[in-house]
Image (spheres, rainbow, N blue to C red):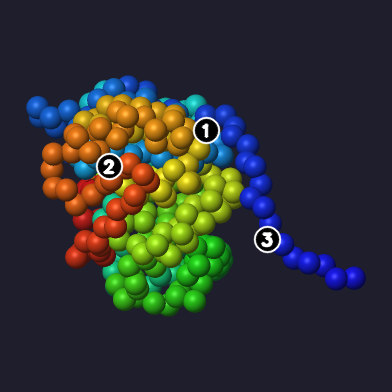
């Protein structure tokens, strides 16, 4: 019998209970209110987009969610538990992120970078690590195997031994995602995952994000590429000057004149980005310093 193979249709996914609930999140820097009274709910199985012109407060909001900043006001809960605004507590609770400016350990291999992400889930105490006993070796092996699995998942299986700094820009972005996934999150936040990518890489990134969602994670993604956002997301929030201007389905947000006005009329800084009308997209060039040590300054 001959079986004609057709590509599997994308399964309709179910949206479940809320995972992330941010309420009244406000972040002030002196006289500047970068994020103002933002509420956001993300449900199981959802991909939520966060858009807005340069300086709208998108990254600052991510920094508040992930404990890099302690919000001036507001509260963040993950699966019903209030999470303290500390990066380690946030990761342990099940929220991972990538950064707008890529942060990898430049002189470590791809595999080692992912293994670093995994250490928050291993139990070896410092003494066990120093003695390098059987328990340590077992955990190290398991960590290595999981890291390789994640590299395969993001399409970097053959680059395990490449130094991060020598990898092409698009691969570095995927490596950051693999490292975030290594922390076993329930929710992953991606800050401009396709910045600087060509259309083919952008398509791959969108396929990868669907696969991440299909593997059971919820996703929040910041992007300036509107075609990418509207094709990918179940819901979209548009931030302007730190406040939620509009939220809704991609169709609702795309056709809302306030969103178009915010981008075309309200963006008074450099004009290197963002055209919404007609679904035109932006191409950004990668920053010169794409690889930085993740322990460096907050971003
Ligand atoms: N640590 C900080 N100290 C002072 N001001 C800050 C700090 N971090 C961010 N800001 C300010 O907060 C505002 C929001 O910045 P943010 O980086 O969150 O914008 P964004 O929406 O991510 O923009 P982009 O699309 O360009 O990445 C900006 O005016 C920025 O200068
Ligand atoms: Mg930003």
Instruction: Work out whether residue 284 can be spotted.
Output: yes
Measured from the top left, where is residue 210 in percent x and y? Answer: 53, 51
Q: Is residue 139 above or below residue 164?
A: above
Specify the farthest residue to the front. Answer: 278
Between disc 3 and disc 2, whose residue precedes? 3
User: Which residue is found at the position 39% from the left and 67% from the top?
Assistant: 171
Measured from the top left, where is residue 60 in percent x and y? Answer: 25, 38
Measured from the top left, where is residue 8 in percent x and y? Answer: 68, 57
User: Which residue is found at the position 25% from the left and 33% from the top?
Assistant: 262
Between disc 1 and disc 2, whose residue precedes? 1
Q: Label 1, secondary structure: give it.
A: strand
Q: Nearer the viewer, residue 54 or 278?
A: 278
Q: Which mark is residue 59?
A: 2
Q: Gap in Å between the C-alphas at discs 3 and 2?
A: 37 Å
The reply to whether the C-beta atoms of the residues labelled 1 and 3 are less than 8 Å apart is no
Q: Quadrant of residue 193?
A: bottom left
Instruction: Work out whether residue 124 can be spotted.
Output: no
Q: Quadrant of residue 153?
A: bottom right
Specify the farthest residue to the right. Answer: 1
Q: Label 2, secondary structure: give it.
A: helix
Q: Nearer the viewer, residue 92 or 165?
A: 165
Q: Is residue 15 left or right of residue 93?
A: right
Q: Which mark is residue 7?
A: 3
Tell me if mark 2 has few (under 14), some (14-19) or many (20+) residues whose alpha carbon lies within 10 angstroms of its own. many
Q: Gap in Å between the C-alphas at discs 1 and 3?
A: 28 Å
Measured from the top left, where is residue 107 in percent x and y? Answer: 29, 72
Between disc 1 and disc 3, whose residue precedes? 3
Tell me if mark 3 has few (under 14), some (14-19) or many (20+) residues whose alpha carbon lies within 10 angstroms of its own. few
Tell me if mark 1 has few (under 14), some (14-19) or many (20+) residues whose alpha carbon lies within 10 angstroms of its own. many
Give the residue pinned by disc 1: 43
Q: Label 3, secondary structure: give it.
A: loop
């Amino acid at each position: 019998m001959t079986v004609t193979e057709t590509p599997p249709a994308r399964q309709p996914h179910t949206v479940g209970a809320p995972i992330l609930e941010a309420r009244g999140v406000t972040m002030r820097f002196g006289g500047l209110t970068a994020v103002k009274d933002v509420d956001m709910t993300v449900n199981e199985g959802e991909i939520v987009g966060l858009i807005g012109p340069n300086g709208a407060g998108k990254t600052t909001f991510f920094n508040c969610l992930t404990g890099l900043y302690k919000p001036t006001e507001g509260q963040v809960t993950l699966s019903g538990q209030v999470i303290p605004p500390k990066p380690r507590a946030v990761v342990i609770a099940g929220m991972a992120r990538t950064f707008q400016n890529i942060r990898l350990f430049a002189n470590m291999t791809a595999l080692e970078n992912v293994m670093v992400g995994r250490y928050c889930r291993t139990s070896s105490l410092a003494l066990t690590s120093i003695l390098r006993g059987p328990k340590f070796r077992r955990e190290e092996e398991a960590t290595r195997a999981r890291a390789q699995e994640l590299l395969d998942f993001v399409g970097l299986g053959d680059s395990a031994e490449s130094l991060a700094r020598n990898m092409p820009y698009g691969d570095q972005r995927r490596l950051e995602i693999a490292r975030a996934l290594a922390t076993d999150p329930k929710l992953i936040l991606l800050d401009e995952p396709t910045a600087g990518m060509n259309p083919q890489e952008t398509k791959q990134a969108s396929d990868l994000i669907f696969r991440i969602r299909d593997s059971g994670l919820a996703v929040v993604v910041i992007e300036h590429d509107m075609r990418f956002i509207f094709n990918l997301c179940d819901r979209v929030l548009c931030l302007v000057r730190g406040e939620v201007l509009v939220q809704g389905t991609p169709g609702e947000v795309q056709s809302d004149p306030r969103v178009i006005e915010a981008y075309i009329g309200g963006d008074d800084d450099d004009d290197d980005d963002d055209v919404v009308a007609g679904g035109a997209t932006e191409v950004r060039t990668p920053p010169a310093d794409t690889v930085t040590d993740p322990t460096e300054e907050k971003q």
